[in-house]
Image: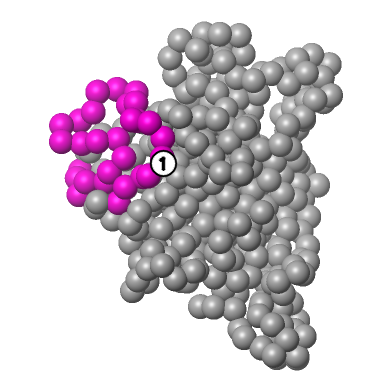
Amino acid sequence: MSAPDGATGTGWGRLLDDGRAALPDALASVDEAVTAGGQRALVVRVAGGLSVDVLPDRGLDLGAAWWAGVPVAWRSPNPRDPGPGRDWEDRFLGGLLATCGPDNIGSPRGASGQHGTHHLTPAHDVRWWRERTDGGELEVHVTGSVAHSTLYGARVVVDREVVVATGRPWVEVRDTVRNVGTEPVGVPLLYHVNLGAPVLLPGSRLVTGAGEPAPAAPLPPRRDAVTFPEPARGAAYVVAEHPGVGDVDGWARAVVSPTGLAHPDGAEVVVEWRAASMPRLYSWLWPAAGSWVLGVEPANAPLAGPERDLPHGGAPVLGPGESWECGVRVGVQRTDGVRSTGTSQDAR
């Protein structure tokens, strides 16, 4: 659905200007909710855009996401989070984004468990607001901080901002990672973007513009690292690295095409990230019946291999008082040549 036309221009906010909508809530709403599993969620709904759940109890990661009435994010087979004492995979419920790090990504390393602590750490100082764009849209901003600190050791804080807008089928996550401790610290990060049915169909393919993908293990028979076969019970997952991902204006891109979104002309799901701070890309393709997921995973450090034996697991190092910015955004675009209700350029 396109933004409404009007004599004074286009943009959903025009409905407020001429009195057709009385309150911003009618176009961009934020509801505080508690999930069936007992966790807090900020349910963000926007007219003509991508609606998402922002999860304060999971590091302001993203849960369910919907576009034009169709779910985009993958839901894990785990019905509930069993809580502390179980490993990361047992507690993984899916969602559009699970942030891994900043103490570890990949398999357990030293005293750090699989994929680190961010996704299982509550955010603090969480707040949200709306603001008007020059194009007449309404943006919803959710901000907060996630502390990863020890009493006598490393102290890293991730300041996060999530942005969703009317008329724009994108959600953007903007992070500032700060070392507030007194010693240098390695900070591995990985954005675990999770897509499932009905976005994914047999034949859906991950297109990265990178070099030949390098699977972490030998491929199963009649399989490749980037194409979904028919769902099959017990089908093995494939993890691969995609070397040499390029960028445009500092943003790298991966496209899932074609997808099964319920539009007569089809659509693609696009994942973009800041290439300078996340120079690596991994994928996790699991076509098993009852699982059926694609993980698109920009990262700044190795998931496996001899580099993990280097100091800090091969991750970049932040000195005391230093910070860097990174981010990821996920959107939907039509495949019929017609511009969708927003583009990645609009999300910048």
Q: Tell me: residue 95, above or below residue 18.
A: above
Main secondary structure along the magenta-highlighted residues: loop
**In this figure, what is the number of numbered marks?**
1
Residue 224 placement: quadrant: top left
For the point 58% across and 32% down, the residue is 278
Q: Which residue is mark 1?
A: 208
Q: What percent of the width, then of the height, locates residue 7?
A: 69, 90
Q: Secondary structure at mark 1?
A: loop
Residue at point 75% right, 91% down?
Answer: 19
Quarter containing the C terminus: bottom right
Q: Is residue 227 left or right of residue 336?
A: left
| Residue shown at 72% from the left, 49% from the top | 161
The part of the image, by quadrant, that contains residue 260 is bottom left
User: Dot 1 surroundings within 10 Å: few (below 14), some, or many (20 or more)?
Assistant: many
What segment is highlighted magenta in the picture?
204-233
Percent x, y of residue 86: 50, 30
Horizontal arrangement in the rendering, residue 266 relative to residue 134 (left or right): left
Spot the residue most to the left: 222
Q: Is any atom of residue 101 visible in this view?
A: no
Q: Residue at x 20, y 49 (%)?
A: 230
Residue 347, position in %: x, y?
63, 57
Q: Which colour assignment does the render follow?
A: one colour
Q: Is residue 224 visible?
A: yes
Query: Which sits in the foreground, 142 or 92?
Result: 142
Q: Is residue 36 magenta?
A: no
Please tell me in which quadrant of the rendered image residue 323 appears. top right
In the picture shown, does residue 218 fall above or below 202? above
> Percent position (x, y) of residue 277?
63, 32
Q: Amino acid at mark 1?
A: Thr
Whether the magenta-drawn stretch holds residue 212 is answered as: yes
From the viewer's perspective, is residue 24 above or below residue 337? below
